Image (spheres, grey):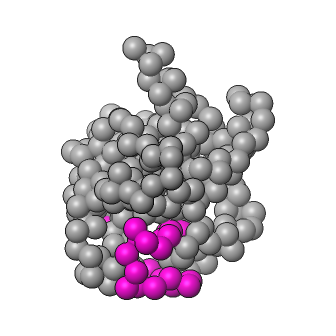
Amino acid sequence: MCSSMANLLLPAKLKLDFSDKERSSSIIVPTKRSNRKKQSIIPVARLFGQAIFEASKLNVLFLGVDEKKHPSKLPRTYTLTHSDMTAKLTLAISHSTNRSQLQGWANRLYRDEVVAEWKKVKSKMSLHVHCHISGGHFLLDLIAGLRYFIFCKELPVVLKAFAHGDGNLLNNYPELQEALVWVYFHSNIPEFNKVECWGPLREATSSDGCKTHTCETLPEQPCLDECTCCFPTVSTIQWSHSRGSRGGEDEDVDIAGGNLVTKYMYNHNKRK
């Protein structure tokens, strides 16, 4: 019962392995005091172990993008998903979110996709990453805190996948390694509905990026009037977020992150 519930609730690529009897027994309260310490370490080690990027498990699709075009001139979006069948990651690099990757019941259940886009704001390049923490169905709401922790733990791997898959772009424009990474955590629970700055891309890809570089803050907003220092003028990511019983209605965020920034400012000021 516990193993099936864990597999159901955790993001698909991060499910814990409960097939081994010795490991699954570690979740049972031990009867002997001498075994308590040994048994309690096993699940903690699996959850807190270092996330590792494996290039051999990454499949990259270029969909209509030009590797030689700087993202300040042509929209560039990343869509990253995971397959349970092959245990591989699929990264689509395109002008907008690759919706064909996000179809099917499994994606709607797990919501473990990560999408990102390059932006130029006030002539400065930045990478904006979006993760779904909770909302849509109650199972995600039950473990919102755990999902937030796991996404933070795995994000350096996600960013490495972006950097590896789009390596030619970064080689042609090495200054993009200095671009700030902004992470938008979408949740119907205010505590996890936040925006974080993870520092420059070259630092955010490190395994300890979540511990040393993140801070809750707000990204600079693009110009309200027509200009040449901001691109694209409208986000290439359309984030669909079901508010469920807490919000009372569904909302489609046409300008991804804009609505979340507004909510973050409200909650941040309220805490003060």
- Residue 245, percent across and down? 76, 31
Residue 247, can we see it? yes
Q: Is residue 201 left or right of residue 193?
A: left
Q: Residue at the location (62% across, 72% down)?
A: 98
- Residue 50, percent across and down? 29, 59
Nearest the viewer among 18 and 269 is: 269
Q: Residue at the location (22% across, 68% down)?
A: 175
Q: Which image quadrant: the C terminus?
A: top left
Q: Which residues are magenta?
A: 52-80
Q: Is residue 130 left or right of residue 172?
A: right
Residue 43, can we see it? no
Q: How many marks?
A: 0
- Residue 19, percent across and down? 54, 64
Q: Residue at the location (30% across, 38% down)?
A: 215
Q: Is residue 64 magenta?
A: yes
Nearest the viewer among 29 and 220 is: 220
Nearest the viewer among 13 and 185 is: 185
The image quadrant that residue 113 belongs to is bottom right
Nearest the viewer among 235 and 129 is: 235
